Image (cartoon, rainbow, N blue to C red):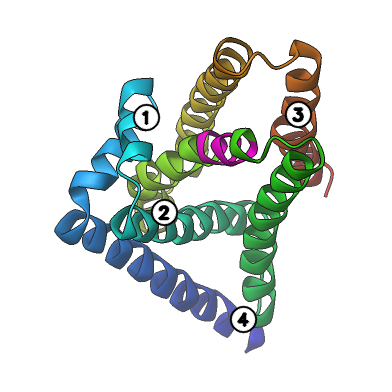
Amino acid sequence: MIALTKPFFNQDIIFVLLTISFLLIAILRASYWKHAKLLFMGVFAQRYANQYLREENAFTERVNFITFLLMTINFSLILLKVIPQTSLSEVVFLIGGVMLFFILKTGIMLFFGKIFMLQDVAKLGVFFSFLFDRALGFFLFPLVVMLYFFAFDITITLFIIISIVCILLLLLKLFWMWKIGTNAFGLSEFYIFLYLCALEISPLLLLGKRVFYQ
């Protein structure tokens, strides 16, 4: 009986999370699309990201908060497909772990910015680092829906597509952060390399190890 009820229980949780994700996208589209569009276009052209930063106000703060939640939920849904959980507490723990990772990442960057008296640079680093993650969380939503509720099983194909999208955006993210760090702020290439390895690449390698060797 337990074996039969767990899949339905999990599907209910997934449905609720996808509904929340869709609601967040609807709020962005209905009330904050002007600023959200600038944020997402900033992935492909720095001038849009700069314009978004110049227009910083209560609306952009709300966009940041909504896209942070959207990013957390959609990344968690992908992880739940890779590392299935069987209870509500485990699902909440996984989502909390994803959120905690992003919060710690922000805290570490701001902490080192304060130590080296580069607070403004650290804040910009946080923005550009999460710019790509927020956009990825938004663009992955249709794929996440198909991952769970497609008419027939295309999980492997969808994972390949998701991996390609993630890798492309990661490479774009690394390129922009390297370019902005060296050209705009004159930071040492060695320190940028250490940052990228520690906070951008290492977590993905650890996740890959967890998935393939669980």
When the figure is inspected, residue 206 is found, relative to residue 26, above or below; the finding is above
Of badges 4 and 1, nearer the viewer stands 1
> Is label 3 in a helix, a strand or a loop?
helix
The percent coordinates of residue 16 (x first, y second) are 40, 75
Closer to the chain start, of discs 2 and 4, is: 2
- Which residue is label 3 attached to? 195
- Which residue is label 4 attached to? 88
Q: Quote the CA–CA distance across marks 3 and 2.
A: 23 Å
40 and 88: which is toward the camera: 40
The percent coordinates of residue 56 (x first, y second) are 35, 47
Name which residue type carries label 2. Answer: Asn
Main SS class of the magenta portion in the image: helix
Closer to the chain start, of discs 3 and 2, is: 2
Q: Quote the CA–CA distance across marks 1 and 3.
A: 22 Å
- Kindly identify the residue that appears in the image at 54 percent across and 31 percent down: 163
Segment colored magenta: 122-129
The outermost residue toward the front is 117
Closer to the chain start, of discs 1 and 3, is: 1
Within the magenta stretch, is there residue 22?
no
Of badges 2 and 4, nearer the viewer stands 2
> Is label 4 in a helix, a strand or a loop?
helix
Q: Quote the CA–CA distance across marks 1 and 2.
A: 15 Å
The percent coordinates of residue 94 (x first, y second) are 67, 65
Q: Quote the CA–CA distance across marks 4 and 1.
A: 41 Å
When the figure is inspected, residue 55 is found, relative to residue 202, above or below; the finding is below
191 and 157: which is toward the camera: 191
- Kindly identify the residue that appears in the image at 64 percent across and 38 percent down: 122
Q: Quote the CA–CA distance across marks 2 and 4.
A: 27 Å
**Residue contact between numbered discs 4 and 3, judged by CB atoms under 8 Å:** no
Q: How many marks?
A: 4
- Which residue is label 2 attached to? 64
- Which residue is label 1 attached to? 50
